[in-house]
Amino acid sequence: MKPILQNLVEMTGHRDHLRLEVSVLSTIEKLTGILAVRSLEIFTLGDVLHVRPRTWRGPEDWVSTDEDAAKDPRREPLSNYPELQACVLDHGALAKASGTVGGKKRYTLWLPVWMNDKVTTCLEVSQVRRFSAHRIDVMIGIFSVYQNYQSLLDYSERDALTDLYNRKTFDEQFARHASTRADDAEAPTAQNQQWLAVIDIDHFKQVNDRFGHLYGDEVLILMANTLRSSFRPHDRIFRFGGEEFVVLLRSTNLATAQQIFNRFRKTVENQHFPQVGRVTVSVGFVSTAAGSSVEILGQADQALYFAKENGRNQVRYYGDLVAQGLLQTKVHHDDVELF
């Protein structure tokens, strides 16, 4: 039991969901008789539940992905795993199945990760013998520590009002994105870029002053819901505080990015907010292909404030504004001076 306890101590030292996931898989893998362990992502595509590998043991080390699940060629309908599908539909705690792989018997156990009455991931464990009651108890104990810590980590990453990711989480995820970008041998193509948008609710102070903070909070909650429904699962949405939000839009080209941000803006414009009525947003966005996080965020901010100072309720792309001579950026000693 000592190696397991050491792994549990290591597991609760992580402050990142994927690293925590790798840690729990590594802990279970060390149990005797385990053939394979991996994490599966469960998601909806065209009203049908699908599953795909998210973290697994590679030839040399653990491999994780958070790319668009809908485009992953390894995705499968959840119905290909009938025992797991029944468990998910019944909000169950575990599922078991057996089969033959390469002429050898294999037994599989699934442990769905339930958070806020939803399941998005599941741990899968395979071994050559039936799962004894003791083995299941041990794995459920490890899994419970993992799930409880996962919930605490998720709570610390989110804004209490809107349940979107908070500013601290943005700083961590964007730093990791920049590091991955720097290590990536293949530069992003024009068709496969990442974009950062800063979104601000127009005249939000007037909403609070006229209707009170209770209705102001309701506007923020409804805005968060609209953001969630307007972007893809693998995009990232953050609340920076007040009425400002940030979106990391992934793996698309400039024209599509402009369409997506404008579609969101029009959705908000056409939405009815109880008591308040009509609300609009201004958006400034930029490519994340080059520059430090401070520069990129500053450039998106410049585009946002240009939109707000020139009529509001519009989307502005930093690159176009610079090309048209409407904005200038001067970089001096790694500091960004904004005009």
Image (spheres, rainbow, N blue to C red):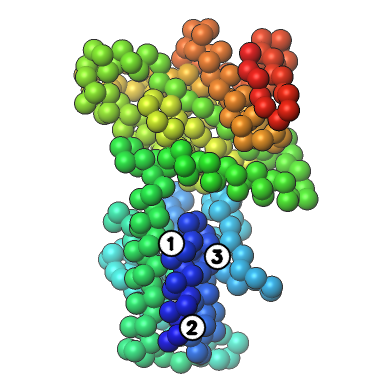
Q: Quadrant of residue 55?
A: bottom right
Residue sitting farthest toward the right: 185
Q: Disc 1 designates what residue?
A: 121
Of residue 291 and residue 9, the one placed in the foreground of this image is 9
Residue sitting at x 51%, y 22%:
283
Secondary structure category for the residue under label 1: strand
Residue sitting farthest toward the top: 310
Of residue 300 and residue 98, the one placed in the foreground of this image is 300
Residue sitting at x 72%, y 23%:
331
Q: Mark 1: few, some, or many residues within 10 Å (few <14, many ≥20)? A: many
Q: Disc 2 designates what residue?
A: 3
**Residue 209 spot, x, y in % from top left:** 26, 14
> Could you tell me the amino acid type at mark 2?
Pro
How far apart marks 2 and 3 lie (CA) works out to 22 Å
How far apart marks 1 and 2 lie (CA) works out to 25 Å
Q: Disc 3 designates what residue?
A: 55
Q: Earlier in the sequence, mark 1 or mark 2?
A: 2
Q: Mark 3: few, some, or many residues within 10 Å (few <14, many ≥20)? A: many
**Residue 124 spot, x, y in % from top left:** 46, 73
Secondary structure category for the residue under label 2: helix
Q: Earlier in the sequence, mark 3 or mark 1?
A: 3
Q: Earlier in the sequence, mark 2 or mark 3?
A: 2
> Could you tell me the amino acid type at mark 1?
Thr
How far apart marks 3 and 1 lie (CA) works out to 10 Å
Of residue 234 and residue 204, the one placed in the foreground of this image is 204
